[in-house]
């Protein structure tokens, strides 16, 4: 009696151990199946040439399926030494064009020099800093690297690292 | 093995192998329902009907739907709507049923609250029902995304973004759920899987559990009278069908429900035929565009109240970001109803009109939910933002503070 019972509990224990290990591995595999594919991750770099931009011009480009706002600041626009990307002595606002509240795309209102998010009324100033409404933080700055007059998005250049360190 | 005799008919043949008579007794003929209930108790059967409609029309739609960002929009708006014979009918039935099902769910829930059907002994019925509500919401949301129109896309963008508010793992979690840095093809295909496979299976399992959880404490009734079901059932079976306070599910109860189902189906097909537009957002007839947000993003009407709680808090309080307060309030709104049996501490089961304070509480809650729903749709500017703010506060206070206080007062009053 005693023997068979300890055998049974041993088998229970052995089965439990095998099941736990198998279960843990399956969970890892399932988690990874949901992760972005390598092709998705690889498509994460975009290069833009800024030399043709006019003062005060706003350009929207796509990077990692997100809109990126690039604004070349005109002389009368307030500079922000912490957030401006300086290329060729010109200051640019380079931000991910998704409201930091819930991810809508704010629209640029040139007359008021504001980015306005229609979803819940959030507003950002010309440097992308939140000035009104529910957005909890300024518009995010994408990782970038400067190459001459070109901007490479997706790579963390020294200028970007300095910017992040100061913020 | 049981003794198998030569069968005297097909029913007998089945009965010997599957005990169909016993099964029918358990499910229908000897499943006892109180007599004193009104039309509000028919909502469960109507929900079952609607779920069946959703399931069947869904099967027909899925034959032509293509889960691919390049093809999805046209497979719905061209193939199904214009080419497939009666495709428009299945789509409108599916869309209208998905919307109306929430109306009936809300009536079902509020009936439960009004008559105290979540209390003492019936907690599991309530909890399984709330679970159904939550999974149904996920089902509705994942389905809303499939036509890949502008509203589908941006609703998906906003809702998946909400998970970014979870501390530490938020950002990574959002990418993991989407399978990409933004909502795109992998997101569509995984939501397709959820909508047509995983969630329906889960829903069916919880429905079975919800029904099962009714069998032991039994259905509540209009006057919340506590019945001895065994005794009443014996009376009924002894022939005193008039004197007994219960009737069998079949034929007694269901035959009455069929009348309500018929009335409801007339209303349903009126909507499908003439008013299907309310379940379809016009913006969703523009194909999804990742680089252009529609001016106003709002969910379908049945999510508006919790959406308004989310955005009702629009200013920071003492260093806590408005966004985080809103997110926390939203999170509370999602789970607070689960706790109802414990927030309402009085264990007297009585309909609301016999509990004066609770009666007021119930109607204030209902009005507040309507206000939240209405303002959830309006642009959140100026006075609207403040109405939304106060209505959100009222909602939270009603459930977290007022209800427990009321029931404590009731308890004290009862002792005196
Ligand atoms: S998403 Fe921009 S204010 Fe809410």
Image (cartoon, rainbow, N blue to C red):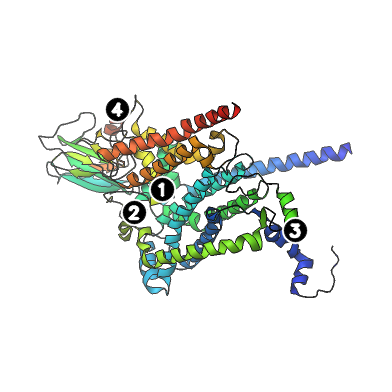
**Do badges 1 and 2 share one subunit?**
yes
Q: Comparing marks 1 and 2, which lies closer to the viewer?
A: 1
Label 2 crowd (10 A; few <14 / some 14-19 / many >=20): many
Is B164 positioned to the left or the right of B231 in the image?
left
Disc number for residue B237: 3
Locate ligand 1 by image quadrant: top left
Do marks 3 and 2 share a chain?
yes
Which residue lies under the disc numbered 2?
B151
SS of the residue at dot 3? Answer: helix
Q: How far apart in space, not on screen, are marks 4 and 3 (Cα)?
A: 79 Å
Name the residue located 39 percent from the left edge and 50 percent from the top edge.
B156
Q: Do the residues marked 4 and 2 share a common chain?
A: no
Chain of the residue on which disc 4 is drawn: A
Q: Residues within 10 Å of mark 4 (few under 14, many from 20)?
A: few
Residue B316: which numbered mark, if any?
Answer: none
**Disc 4 marks which residue?**
A167
Label 1 vs 2, first from the N-terminus: 2
Q: Is residue B158 left or right of residue A25?
A: left
Q: CA distance from mark 3 to mark 2?
A: 57 Å
Q: Is residue B65 visible?
A: no
The answer for which chain carries disc 2 is B
């Amino acid at each position: 009696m005693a023997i068979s019972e300890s055998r049974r509990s041993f088998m229970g224990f052995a089965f439990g151990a095998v099941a736990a290990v198998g279960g843990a591995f399956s969970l890892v595999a399932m988690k990874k199946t949901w992760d972005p594919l390598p092709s998705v991750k690889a498509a994460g770099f975009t290069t833009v040439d800024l030399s043709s931009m006019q003062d005060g011009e706003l350009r929207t480009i796509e990077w990692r399926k997100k809109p990126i706002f690039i604004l070349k600041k005109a002389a009368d626009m307030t500079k922000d030494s912490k957030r401006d990307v300086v290329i060729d002595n010109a200051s640019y606002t380079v931000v991910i064009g998704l409201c930091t509240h819930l991810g809508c795309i704010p629209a640029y209102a040139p007359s008021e020099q504001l980015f306005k998010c229609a979803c819940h009324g959030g507003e950002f100033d010309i440097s992308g800093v939140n000035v009104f409404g529910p957005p909890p933080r300024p518009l995010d700055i994408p990782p970038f690297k400067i190459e001459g007059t070109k901007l490479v998005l997706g790579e963390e250049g020294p200028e970007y690292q300095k910017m992040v360190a100061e913020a | 093995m049981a003794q198998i005799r030569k069968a005297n008919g097909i029913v007998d043949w089945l009965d010997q192998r599957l005990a169909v008579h016993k099964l029918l007794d358990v499910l229908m003929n000897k499943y006892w329902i109180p007599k004193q209930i009104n039309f509000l108790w028919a909502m469960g059967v109507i929900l079952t009907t609607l779920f069946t409609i959703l399931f069947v029309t869904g099967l027909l739609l899925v034959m032509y739907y293509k889960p691919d960002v390049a093809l999805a929009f046209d497979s719905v708006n061209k193939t199904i709507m214009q080419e497939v014979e009666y495709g428009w009918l299945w789509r409108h039935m599916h869309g209208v049923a998905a919307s109306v099902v929430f109306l009936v769910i809300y009536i079902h829930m509020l009936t439960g609250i009004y008559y105290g059907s979540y209390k003492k002994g019936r907690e599991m019925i309530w909890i399984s029902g709330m679970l159904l509500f939550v999974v149904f919401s996920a089902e509705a949301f994942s389905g809303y995304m499939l036509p890949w129109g502008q509203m589908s896309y941006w609703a998906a963008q906003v809702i998946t973004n909400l998970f970014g508010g979870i501390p530490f793992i938020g950002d990574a979690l959002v990418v993991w759920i989407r399978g990409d840095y933004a909502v795109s093809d992998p997101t569509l295909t995984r939501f397709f899987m959820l909508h047509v496979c995983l969630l329906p299976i889960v829903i069916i399992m919880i429905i079975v559990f919800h029904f099962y959880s009714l069998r032991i404490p039994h259905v509540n009734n209009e006057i919340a009278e506590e019945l001895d079901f065994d005794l009443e059932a014996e009376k009924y079976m002894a022939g005193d069908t008039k004197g007994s306070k219960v009737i069998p599910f079949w034929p007694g109860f269901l035959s009455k429900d069929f009348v309500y189902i018929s009335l409801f189906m007339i209303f349903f097909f009126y909507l499908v035929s003439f008013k299907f537009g309310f379940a379809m957002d016009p913006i969703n007839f523009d194909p999804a565009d990742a680089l252009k947000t529609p001016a106003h993003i709002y969910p379908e009407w049945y999510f508006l109240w919790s959406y308004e709680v989310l955005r009702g808090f629009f200013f920071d309080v003492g260093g806590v970001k408005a966004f985080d307060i809103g997110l926390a309030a939203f999170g509370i709104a999602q789970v607070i109803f689960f706790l109802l049996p414990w927030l309402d501490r009085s264990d007297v089961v009585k309909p609301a009109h016999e509990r004066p304070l609770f009666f007021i509480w119930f109607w204030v809650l209902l009005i507040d939910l309507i206000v939240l729903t209405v303002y959830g749709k309006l642009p959140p500017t100026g006075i609207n933002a403040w109405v939304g703010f106060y209505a959100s506060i009222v909602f939270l206070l009603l459930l977290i503070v007022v209800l427990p206080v009321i029931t404590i007062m009731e308890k004290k009053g009862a002792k005196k």
